[in-house]
Each structure stands twice: as structure tokens, then as C-alpha cells.
Image (cartoon, rainbow, N blue to C red):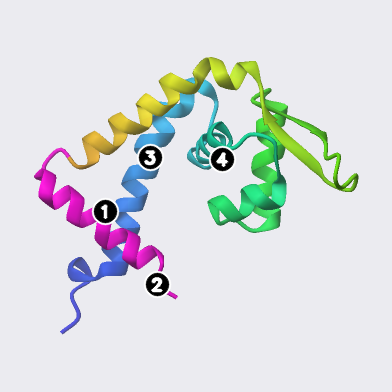
Amino acid sequence: MFELNESLSFLLSKCNQTAFALSQERLSEYSLTPEQAVALTYLFKKDGINQLQLGEMIQKDRTTISGIVNKLEASGYIRKGVNPSDKRSSLIYITEKALAIKEAMLEQAVEVNRFLTKDLTDQERECLITALKKIRNCK
């Protein structure tokens, strides 16, 4: 018989809700959503990319990434600049405001991960991450 509390999709969904709520709470002081923080994290690693590239990196469609970018720009965390190789698209750059919160924001992410896995051994944590990566890449 089907048991909902043994269902992988149900458990993943509930874990996602828990992680999202925790992240949202921690990011509220910066007026950021978890998705916006993910976008900034990618931009910290690779600044000066276009919206399409950022969308591919965080696996979001054009409409969703457009909303994220527009909100980050309105909040002053990023700015758009002219793309010298394609005048039809803009490049996205992080601002001083974003750099000012970078370390604290990344530390918040570490703390959320630590909290979520506090009852796991190091080996269980590694196995979970490996399994989730495999599931994420399932097609």
C-alpha cells in the first residue's frame, strides 16, 4: 500500500519547504528571497554575464529569471550594463551593495545547511548530497 510519508516526492517537497522557509527567514534582513540569493551567489562567482546565462546556471525559465533580475536591480544589488558583443542584450554586474552583504549572506546559507543536517553524521550528509545530485540530474 502507498504510504505518503515514505514517498520520495512528498519528502523532498516537505524538505524543500522547510529549507525555503528557513532561508527566507535568514535573508529577510537583506530583503532577498532564496531565489534572488541563489542568483547573487552565481553572480559572485561569475560577474558580467547576461540574463540567459544566469537563467541557465540557476535553471530558471526566461520569465522567472527576468523577475529575479528586475527585483535585484530595483533593490540595488545588481546593475545592467551594455553587452559590447551584442547590443540587444545587457550584462549583469553585482554592485557594492551586494558585495557588502556577500560574506554574511553566504554564512547564512552555511548555517541553514548546518541546521538542516544537524542530526546527520558526516557520512549521512555526504550520502544525502550525492543522492540528491543524482536525482537532480535525472532526466
| Residue of label 2 | 138
Q: Are marks 1 and 2 in contact (CB under 8 Å)?
A: no
* Quadrant of the frame with the N terminus: bottom left
Circle 3 crowding by C-alpha within 10 Å: few under 14, some 14–19, many from 20: some
How many C-alpha atoms fall within 10 Å of the one at disc 2: few (<14), some, or many (≥20)? Answer: few
- The amino acid pointed to by label 2 is Cys
**Residue 129: numbered disc:** 1
Residue at point 36%, 49% (across, down): 17
Look at label 1 and name its amino acid. Ile
Mark 1 touches mark 3? (CB < 8 Å)? no
Q: Which residue is mark 3?
A: 21
User: Which label's residue is closer to the chain start, 1 or 2?
Assistant: 1
Q: Is residue 39 above or below residue 97?
A: below
| Disc 4 target residue | 39
Tell me which numbered mark, 2 or 3, is placed earlier along the sequence.
3
Region of the chain picked out in magenta, as a range: 118-139
Q: Position of residue 79 (x, y in %)?
A: 74, 28
